[in-house]
Image: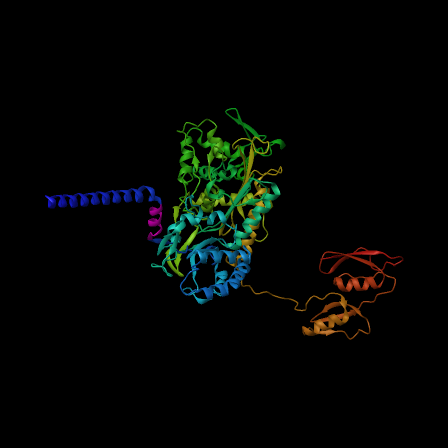
Amino acid sequence: METKKDILWRVYLLYAMMCVFGIAIIAQVVNVQFIQGEKWRAKAEALTTEYREIEAARGNIFATDGSLLATSFPIYEVRMDVCADPITDKIFYSNLDSLALCLTNLFGDKSKSTYKAELTEARKKHNSYLLIQRNVSYVDLQKLKKFPIFKNGKYKGGLITLQQSKRSRPFRELAARTIGYERPGIQPIGLEGAYNSYLTGVGGKRLMQKIAGGVWKPLNDDNEIEPQDGMDLVTTIDINIQDVAEHALLTQLQLHGADHGCTILMEVETGEIRAIANLSKSKNSDEYGEYYNYAIGEATEPGSTFKLASVIALLEDGASPSEIVDTEKGVIYFYGQPMKDSNHDKGGHGKITLHESFEVSSNIGISRMVDKYYSKNPQKFIDRIYAMNLQNELGLEIPGEGKPKIKNPKDKDWSGVSLPWMSIGYELLMTPMDILTFYNAVANNGKMVKPKFVKEITKNGIVEKEFQTQIINPKICSQETIDKVKRMMEGVVDSGTAKNLKHADFKIAGKTGTAQIAKEGIYKGQKITYQASFVGYFPADNPKYSCIVVVNAPSNSVYYGNLVAGPIFKEIADKVYSSRLDIHKELEATEILVENKIPFTQRGNKNDLVTSLQKLNVPLNNDTLNTSRWVTAESKGNKIELKESAETKGIVPKVLGMGARDAIYILENLGLSVKIEGRGTVVKQSINAGTQITTPREIILKLS
């Protein structure tokens, strides 16, 4: 019996112990899961390791001459393992002062004592990932590697560096909107966005550990998988022409107080964009900057520049440039709506030809001709416009292209005045790039090519992909019509609305445009604002470049295209012509016959003339000269004969033909005060030779 009780007692005791143990386990589970759950979850998370993506260096964007338009340069996040095994207390504390001093001298953001305190505190807390500085340049990193402790190397010095890339545009705002940017979470723009897949490259991998504070620390000094850098873009942009274009545009915007403007220069045959500038006023100041790509994104009513399309349609359907149209006194009516010419207050143009209507940009002349040929069948006119591809987007790689709009008689908003108003560039929408592409097609003998921004994609200098010129329309109209409208556009500059652009060295062909724009209410107290433009090509007899300039909302009472946009076009054309020998006419190799090889010689100082002529081996006859200091020169056969030029005291001498220096010397020695106008040799003197000098007098010499 005693044995049985003893066994039961032991069983009960064991059972009780098991229950207590089970309860303890349950209690600990509850404690770990709920009471200390946050602590242990944080610790587990802190011990997480994973492969983290390492960003590849983004490819460069180059101008056509190799200049950098956009590039990436490395910046570094610098940290320190203060408790690295090789850094003993002796090494740390003996170098602490000098390290802190070096850091404050390099970065200048904290005092020596602050750096020293942070390093000491990190040492006490066994911080193996102390942040020293972010956004450190490569140059500063090289300096930092020579600092105390750090100079012991990356293993013994506790130095940890994380490389990142920072995007930069060396030319700052130059073509900024076209170059664009690509940023996480933001709609990409420009070439950066369009060619992002080429520029990005392939990221690498690095094994990293998440430590306290959610900070990721690399476990090794090197990347496990090295990133592959992105490819490079070689654009069509000419950085020198781009600079001229932006400066010329800025000057005119400031001069006329305009809201915004743009300009584009295109190579006729290839469609390559050599320059594209977009400037607008800041919302908070009168400063101009590149905030939006108006050249490709803003579709507006183009106004008179669209008249070229109307004239092409007319010529294709049988109209003649010499056909007469009556513009009356500058005002007519379509369905009760007045149509006016710019000179209606001066009596209008009267009866003029279609050719003249285009040259003087007569709204009435063009609209009446279009009404005459198409009023019974407006769809025929629209079909002509559609055949020139003016209703289609260009399909540019750069995002944000504005959509052109060419109405159709079937549309709900078509009315009786739509046809005449469309013929002069209203009730339709086109971007500056659309208009330029159209004019470029005329310069290219009817072949419409797609605007091109990128020539090739390269990798380590090797061409990976080359972009060929794309043809949108092989022939927008007949060659006969092209030849006729080319003469019309030359006439605009020779004797029409753009006479101020007539050039002595090369011919320009084009069209002015002045459109009234009603946009989103009132601009500076006006119900309407203006859009001034000029579009054309040069040299007119052998077109190489086409260009458009559009200036919106000029506010200083000058708004005509030839006065606002024309000077910008001319400055760009001058720069291109002066720097492109291939567009100059080749000089004919003709024999130049010289009847007299004796050089022209001025009156002047005898010694100077004799010395100069002898150096040039010019035969000289000066036997008749005695001591005269001043002489005249005369060609005698194949010799120069020098004659004395005597100056009488108190008498104004003849100084015609002399250089300014000699003339001033003679006259001032006679007591005359000399005033010079112009440069070169003396062609006129205000006091005739032989006049007696009675009192101190001023004599004016005109030079040429």
Q: Is residue 680 above or below residue 213?
A: below
The residue that appears at 45% across and 27% down in the rendered structure is: 415
Q: Is residue 47 magenta?
A: yes
Task: Please say whether residue 524 is visible from this viewpoint.
Answer: yes
Q: Which residues are magenta?
A: 39-49
Task: Please say whether residue 587 is visible from this viewpoint.
Answer: no
Q: Residue furthest right?
A: 694
Q: Quadrant of residue 357?
A: top right
Q: What scheme was used to colour the molecule? A: rainbow
For this rendering, which residue is in front, 415 or 459? 459
Q: Is residue 676 magenta?
A: no
Q: Position of residue 340 (x, y in %)?
A: 56, 31
For this rendering, which residue is in front, 431 or 145? 145
Q: Position of residue 41 (x, y in %)?
A: 33, 46
Most common secondary structure along the magenta stretch: helix
| Residue 459 as seen in the image, left or right of residue 686 | left
Q: Position of residue 5 (x, y in %)?
A: 13, 43
Q: Quadrant of residue 475?
A: top left
Q: Residue furthest top?
A: 336
The residue that appears at 33% across and 51% down in the rendered structure is: 48
Q: Position of residue 528 (x, y in %)?
A: 56, 32
| Quadrant occupied by the N terminus | top left
Q: Residue furthest left?
A: 1
For this rendering, which residue is in front, 422 or 606? 422
Q: Residue furthest front?
A: 2
